[in-house]
Amino acid sequence: MPYAPADAHIQFTLHPDHHPAVTATTTGPTADAARSHLHDHGFRSTGPTTMVLARIDREEPYHTAWASEQLQRYGFTTEIEPALQEEIDTDWNLEENSPTYWVRVGAVSNGAEAQHIHDDIADGRLTIHLHAHDGHTTVAVGSYTTGIRRHVHLHGENHLRQISTSYDTEAEAVAEFHRLYSIAVRPGPAPLTALEQAVRQLLAGKPPSTTEETSAPAAEPPVAKPGEHAAFLSALFDEERQWEKYRPFDETTIASHESLTVRVEFDHEARHRSDIAWKIAEYDSPVGERLWHATITASTPVPLIRAMLQYLDAPPHATAGHPDDVLRDAAWHPASHPTRTTWAAPGRSIVFESTPHAVADRWMLYGGDNLDHAAWTIRLSAGVPLTLLAQLAETAADLLPSPTRPTPKPLAAPARGLPAAVPAQRAHRR
């Protein structure tokens, strides 16, 4: 039986909102057949007669030229606008077999592999378990639903992302990922890059410029301003009832509670987001063993530090109980992983993390507009009271108020005459 005639016309043009993405417009009696072939070449429908090719490797002109050639072989009529043709000619105006030519071939090949990885993640064929930032780029560990290389480590972003290592089992891949990247490991996939977001919006028929204009601005994550910690420390000693301070070095202030079981150290020189500004420790007696300790970085919101010191000075009789209960009531999103549990605030600007098998960093609270490079971090060791963690969780939830969340129970009121930042008289627990 003879094939039906390929009676369709396809026009390729550069996308007006995202260079170098390409739009294909199909017309004619057999346009549906043409669209099927275009789909095989990576084009996706955005309307009854339009399709878009948008890639994270930025090789749309090359793949458009190849698609046009294949469609012509099937008998379809294709037309490439002059501006797009110029892009194609510029990319491949190279002397064949020259060193530059082979560099270009290698770039296309590597970009194609990165594109396959991106598509596998987007289409659900590759599930990302964890990600991290290794100091230079994003790394991740994931598992394919099918295939020979089932469990893999990924390295790089966008067109540079590649499979670096493969493993026989998910447990082996995840364990090795934790060993390599330690406390930098975060659950799930990394946030989409700007290019990935633009590509997905285009393929959904939403130009990036329109999406950006109509989307609501995100709330600014809470971060302490320069000098805010020092001002809080000064207020702490306005009336020296519970705390005694001394400054053995110009850059360090030491505060000791009157019970002699709590010690606080503040570094006046801490500036960078990863610099430790506060060290807090509690002991079982003035000369006893340390029960637990915490470190706090320079941009941590002051209400969280205030909550910790208020608790240590006078633990409230009525508390929220377990931190999980507080965060569940605040509509934070839980996620369980092989070695940790996380609670993410709506909008993912703050995360509360528990690592049950760790000792030094058993609990972490961190936040910022990019959680791969958290603007601030609180780390607490094993032994910290659950009631203190619940108080921290409650304060963190208050930093991002939710209209559906019940009003939290307040901290014990400060003693009369003390500034708002100064803890009330410590209630002895022992």
Image (cartoon, rainbow, N blue to C red):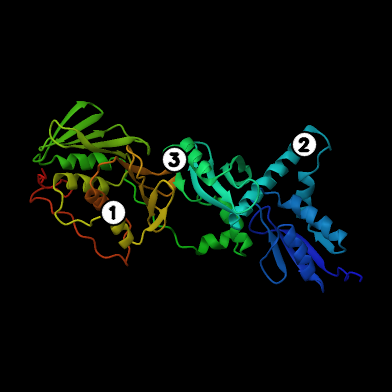
Discs 3/2, front: 3
Q: Residue at x 82, y 67 (%)?
A: 9
The amino acid type found where label 3 is placed reads Ala
Label 1 or label 2, whichever comes before in sequence order: 2
- Under circle 2, the secondary element is helix
How would you rate the neighbour count of disc 2 (Cα within 10 Å): few for under 14, some for 14-19, many for 20 or more?
some
Label 1 or label 3, whichever comes before in sequence order: 3
Image quarter (top left, top right, bottom left or bottom right) of the C terminus: top left
How would you rate the neighbour count of disc 3 (Cα within 10 Å): few for under 14, some for 14-19, many for 20 or more?
some
Image quarter (top left, top right, bottom left or bottom right) of the N terminus: bottom right
Q: Mark 1 and mark 3: span between their CA atoms?
A: 23 Å
Q: Residue at x 68, y 52 (%)?
A: 20
Pointer 2 residue: 102
Numbered-mark total: 3
Q: Is residue 260 above or below residue 318?
A: above
Q: Is residue 364 above or below residue 283?
A: below
**Residue 78: x, y in percent?**
83, 61
Q: Is residue 234 left or right of residue 344?
A: left
Pointer 3 residue: 184
Nearest the viewer among 41 and 176 is 176
The amino acid type found where label 1 is placed reads Pro
Q: Mark 3 and mark 2: span between their CA atoms?
A: 37 Å
The amino acid type found where label 2 is placed reads Trp
Pointer 1 residue: 323
- Under circle 1, the secondary element is helix
